[in-house]
Image (tube, grey):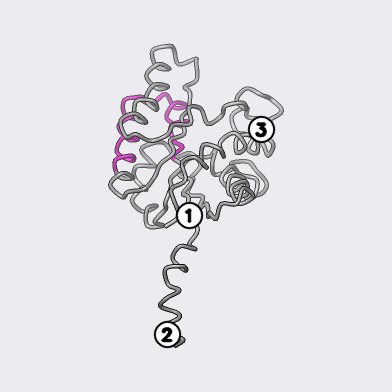
Amino acid sequence: MALALAIALLPLIAQAAPVKILAFGDSLFAGYGLSSDADNIPAQIEKALKAGGHDVTVVNAAVSGDTTADGLARIDWSLQDKPDLVLLELGANDALRGLDPDRAKANLDQILARLKQANVAVLLCGMLAPRNLGPAYAAKFDGMYKDLAEKYQVPLYPFILDGVAMVQVLNQADGMHPNKDGALAIAKRLTPAVEKALPAPK
């Protein structure tokens, strides 16, 4: 009888598994310069989603300094975590180094192709190029996120630093990385988009 009951409960146990979210990005997700991992953007998103009644686990797979090429090199390894949703946040370091936007776009394209092949939902997080690189560079770089979101039919959060970029009190001394308050502000803005992108529990 106990065995029969356990077998009958198996579907319910499977349904109880939390939705696994993989935060795949660079220092912005990694929480560069923050004193606690609990303050970084992915941790704040997990906290907000749970407060909203969602059974989720957010795995922070961000690496400070990563370019799109670095992300491409490690995406297959990161998929071993078998995420249900990936928050793809890469490109800032390509722009800061003035790397070719066409190459960055090709790298992101390959990452998205692998995520699609793995049947993983994606929220693409965009970035804007520094304006001192010129209008031609900025147009190419900024536009690649919209192009890729349309190609792969994934939702786009246009600018990961929306509401925080250039706001001194929300950034660290380097003017590029959000401080604790900035990370919280980004998480609050980003969470509704993440919530909307959540796949149905399995």
Q: Amino acid at mark 3?
A: Gln
Q: Secondary structure at mark 2?
A: helix
**Amino acid type shown at disc 2:** Leu
In this rendering, the label closer to the viewer, 2 or 1: 2
Question: Could you tell me how far apart the alpha carbons at marks 3 and 2 are, in whole angstroms?
Answer: 57 Å
**Residue at horizontal 54%, vertical 44%?**
30
**Foreground: 173 or 1?**
1
State yes or no: discs 2 and 1 in contact (Cβ < 8 Å).
no
Q: Nearer the viewer, residue 141 or 65?
A: 141
For the C terminus, the quadrant is: bottom left
Cα gap from disc 2 to disc 1, whole angstroms: 28 Å
Residue for badge 1: 19
Q: Which residues are magenta?
A: 88-113
Q: Quadrant of the N terminus?
A: bottom left
Q: CA distance from mark 3 to mark 1?
A: 32 Å
Residue occupying the point 40% across, 78% down: 7
The residue pinned by badge 2 equals 3
Identify the element where label 1 is drawn.
Answer: strand
In this rendering, the answer to whether 47 lies above or below 135 is: below
- Mark 2 or mark 1: name the one nearer the start of the chain: 2
Q: Nearer the viewer, mark 3 or mark 1?
A: 1
Which numbered disc flags the more N-terminal residue, 3 or 2?
2
**Of helix, strand and loop, which one carries label 3?**
loop
| Quarter of image, res 136 | top left
- Is 78 situated left or right of 40 in this image? left
Image coords of residue 161 (percent x, y): 56, 29
Residue to which mark 3 is pinned: 172
x, y percent for residue 66 = 44, 39
What secondary structure do most residues of the magenta stretch adopt? Answer: helix
Q: Residue type at mark 1?
A: Val
